[in-house]
Image: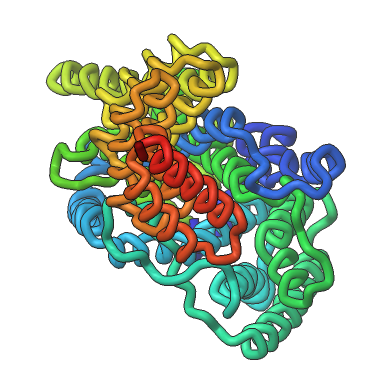
């Protein structure tokens, strides 16, 4: 949503779904109420402290459905598909093409991720601004042109503050990595605005932002009471807490915002709930039989399918890419799905659009309800097949949760089953498999650990996989196999000192002291200040001397 419909005001009740749902969800009141609770409960915690389970549940049940709401809006009805064909067809093909290129070129992948992170604050700001205007119009508030311009400018400046904070010099991030077998998540390509310039720009934008907010509220308050302005004030405060305040505090180094209340996943959940609230109302206004449970189920299936299907189609080695889900593929999928969502959202939600205005600005109970809209018999079977695919994709997402919890609880057999099942669905997890195998090592299950390490070393070779395989084989007293595993790891990382020492110890146990000395000498070159290398060299030298003495007549 972005702009207001011109012309005469459309009268109707002030609320879409009632005061409590509208204030708590649509105006972000629930988020505001959660801030002090999360702040006190998790004081000093950071975004990375969010555990896998709540993040995954939010992604499945809130973020995924909010993508699905856009897909239903554009693709479910033939009329909408034709109306937005430019974005629904050509825009989608463009996103798909860029995604495929990003899979094979890490620099393109980094650009995709950068565009997503840079665009996201504006997407959030645009939605808050559009809903603010909607509330004002539904409350029959006369919005003066100056107030409207100031309100709009405040949201633009909030976005600029977030953009500057993201691209300031010295922020974490860097350039895209070169392509390799160990290619990981594409990194953010920050503009690197010098600290002094960025600081001055942030302070200037902050002052202008404050002026616009105060000016807009002052003008609006002359024409409306507190009750009518409450949703708008709540949205303005949400926008400030999401982007403006953190950017200003970070730039001035006045205070470091570290609470989980400001974590991206929590902000995204509030935004997604807001989006589902308004899209459900629109769907209900255009199809009288729409029910909340059915709507949420359909959006959940559609949204999770949008995330899961690309991972299946571009599973490692299937179409030539070596990216696994956890080492780059998931990041690119998430970024492109969001960019596609931003593109469609900007096209379909405009309050100047007559159909949107009728649904969101005029909602009198006296108006006749539209007839129920359902699929024709021609489309029923394809629709059933699509929903079945969506259900399968949702099952994969749930499987990820089961896999993680099984690892956490030590349910090894269940974890192994889920690893295998997810692998068939394109969700290879070499990093998690290595962690799982290490847990088996600690439990003394050398055979189980060896099986897991061997699979990763075969399909996605890494230092961790080969090193772990060596330790598992040592546990099974296969010293020759262990030595070969360590050497295979060194072929990937010849300067890994820990691996050099492990290989040297194994060669020494096999009586191959010459090779052990070579490996230890290399380790000493890599870590000249590590006394462990010198001690191991001395012990190996003593072993060589003893073996020579024993061999002497």
Q: Nearer the viewer, residue 236 or 443?
A: 443
Percent across and percent down for residue 54 are 61, 30
| 329 vs 352: above or below | above
Q: Which residue appears at 41% of the width and 26% of the height?
A: 474
**Horizontal relation, residue 204 to residue 12: left or right:** right
Q: Which residue appears at 48% of the width and 31% of the height?
A: 435
Residue placed furthest toward the front: 553
**Horizontal relation, residue 95 to residue 21: left or right:** left
| 139 vs 326: above or below | below
Percent across and percent down for residue 428 are 32, 32
Q: Quadrant of residue 21?
A: top right
Residue 206 appears in view = yes
Q: Which residue appears at 29% of the width and 21% of the height?
A: 387
Q: Which residue appears at 64% of the width and 56% of the height?
A: 132
Q: Nearer the viewer, residue 511 or 134?
A: 511
The number of numbered badges drawn on the structure is: 0
Q: Quadrant of residue 153?
A: bottom right
Q: Nearer the viewer, residue 401 or 455?
A: 455
Residue 353 appears in view = no
């Amino acid at each position: 949503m972005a702009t207001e419909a011109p012309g005469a005001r459309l009268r109707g009740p002030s609320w879409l779904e009632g005061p409590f749902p509208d204030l708590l969800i649509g105006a972000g009141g629930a988020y505001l109420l959660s801030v002090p609770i999360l702040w006190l409960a998790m004081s000093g915690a950071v975004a990375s402290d969010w555990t896998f389970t709540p993040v995954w549940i939010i992604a499945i049940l809130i973020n995924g459905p909010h993508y699905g709401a856009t897909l239903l809006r554009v693709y479910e009805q033939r009329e909408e598909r034709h109306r937005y064909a430019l974005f629904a067809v050509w825009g989608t093909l463009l996103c798909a093409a860029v995604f495929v290129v990003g899979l094979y070129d890490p620099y393109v992948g980094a650009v995709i991720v950068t565009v997503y992170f840079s665009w996201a604050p504006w997407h959030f700001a645009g939605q808050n601004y559009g809903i603010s205007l909607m509330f004002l119009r539904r409350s029959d508030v006369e919005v003066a042109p100056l107030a409207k311009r100031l309100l709009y400018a405040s949201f633009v400046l909030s976005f600029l503050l977030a953009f500057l904070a993201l691209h300031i010099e010295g922020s974490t991030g860097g350039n895209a990595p070169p392509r390799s077998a160990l290619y990981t998540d594409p990194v953010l390509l920050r503009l690197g605005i010098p600290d002094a310039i960025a600081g001055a720009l942030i302070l200037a934008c902050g002052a202008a932002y404050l002026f616009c907010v105060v000016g807009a509220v002052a003008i609006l308050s002359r024409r409306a009471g507190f009750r009518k302005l409450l949703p708008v004030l709540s949205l303005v405060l949400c926008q400030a807490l999401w982007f403006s305040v953190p950017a200003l505090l970070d730039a001035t180094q006045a205070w470091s915002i570290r609470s989980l209340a400001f974590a991206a996943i929590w902000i995204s959940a509030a935004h997604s709930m807001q989006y589902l609230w308004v899209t459900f109302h629109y769907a209900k206004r255009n199809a009288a039989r729409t029910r909340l449970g059915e709507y949420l189920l359909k959006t959940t299936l559609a949204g999770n399918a949008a995330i899961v299907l690309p991972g299946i189609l571009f599973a490692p080695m299937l179409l030539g890419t070596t990216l696994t889900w956890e080492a780059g593929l998931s990041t690119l999928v998430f970024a492109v799905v969001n960019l596609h969502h931003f593109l469609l959202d900007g096209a379909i939600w405009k309050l100047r659009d007559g159909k949107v205005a009728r649904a969101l600005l005029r909602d009198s109970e006296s108006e006749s309800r539209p007839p129920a809209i359902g699929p024709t018999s021609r489309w029923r079977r394809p629709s059933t097949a699509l929903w079945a695919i969506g259900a399968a994709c949702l099952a994969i997402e749930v499987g990820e949760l089961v896999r993680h919890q099984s690892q956490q609880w030590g349910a090894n057999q269940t974890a192994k089953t889920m690893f295998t099942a997810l692998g068939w669905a394109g969700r290879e997890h070499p990093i998690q498999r290595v962690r799982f195998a290490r847990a088996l090592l600690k439990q003394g299950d050398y055979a189980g650990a060896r099986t897991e390490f061997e699979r990763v070393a075969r399909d996605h070779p890494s230092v961790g996989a080969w090193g772990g395989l060596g330790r598992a084989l040592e546990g099974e007293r296969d010293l020759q196999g262990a030595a070969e595993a360590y050497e295979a790891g060194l072929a990937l990382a010849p300067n890994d000192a820990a691996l050099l020492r492990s290989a040297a110890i194994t060669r020494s146990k096999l009586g191959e002291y010459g090779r052990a000395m070579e490996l230890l000498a290399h380790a000493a070159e890599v870590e000249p200040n590590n006394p462990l290398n010198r001690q191991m060299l001395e012990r190996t030298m003593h072993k060589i001397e003893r073996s020579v003495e024993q061999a002497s007549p």
